[in-house]
Amino acid sequence: MKKRMGAYLWIGGVLLFLYTPILVLAVYSFSESTMIGSLRGFSLQNYITLFSMPELRRMIGGTILLALVVSLLSTLLGTLGAIGSFYSKAGWRKGMEIANQIPVVNADVVTGFSVCILMTVFWRVDKNTYLPLVIGQTALCTPFVYLSVMPRLSAMDPYLYEAALDLGCTPAQALRKIVLRELLPGILSGFMTAVTLSLDDYFITTYTKPAVFDTISTYVVNATKGAQTQIKTALWALSTVIFLLVVLFVVLMNVLPVMQQKKEQDGVHS
């Protein structure tokens, strides 16, 4: 009993340490305070400012669009890379795994600076285009998609693909109907990881973005260096909205499969 109580206290302490700063920020986003430490009055003004100021709406919309484009590209490349690596010979697979680990361990600032030099110096790409930014963030996110898909491949029966071919499927049909269906949870997990990384990235975005474009991360950093108080407090509301959306998605991702499984079991019993 004492061990169980100690475990509960330890887990509670860890959760409290992780989420207290976010909860404090959420509380202040619903107040009239202009700085952390002096809480006063309930107000929705920060949320009104967040969704009514054109500058903030453009920044949020551009960030979301960039995250979706980068995540789709990263999911496609990471999934195909994982499938190709899994069905390759052992030597090639090991080489792919090592190559995939390098961008994961490598510092973002190195990746961002390298992509900037490659695109603007060697390939002569105009830095005012979005191509360096998309390529840089895709290089950041793709290895994480690979890492999300590979465990699902390892848990899958490696002979399912060959069995589908023997039963008359073309290679494309076997890939779509058998392999990708088995990998769907890993693909979705990799996609959401890529979305999160794109939204959160600062260093690669700073080095590769056009001068007139800002993502949430770069905008927040610049806002803390002298922006209007109204914008700073609106960013508290933005942080709260992002956190609540992430919590909602995680809950749905965990609850919906359980509900689906229960529904299938009820159908079998009936």
Image: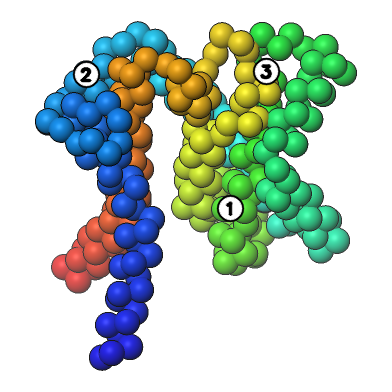
Q: Position of residue 154 (x, y in %)?
A: 62, 64
Q: What is the three-letter code of the residue carrying label 1?
A: Val
Per the rendering, the mark at residue 63 is none
Residue at image position (71%, 57%) is: 86
Q: Residues within 10 Å of mark 1 (few under 14, many from 20)?
A: many
Q: Are marks 2 and 3 in contact (CB under 8 Å)?
A: no
Residue positioned most to the front? 38
Q: Is residue 254 left or right of residue 94?
A: left
Q: What is the three-letter code of the residue carrying label 3?
A: Leu
Q: How is the image coloured?
A: rainbow
Per the rendering, the mark at residue 48 is 2
* Above or below, comparing residue 127 to residue 250 in the picture: above
Q: Toward the viewer: 77 or 105?
A: 105
| C-alpha gap between disc 2 and disc 3 | 34 Å
Give SS at disc 1: helix
Name the residue that disc number 3 marks: 131
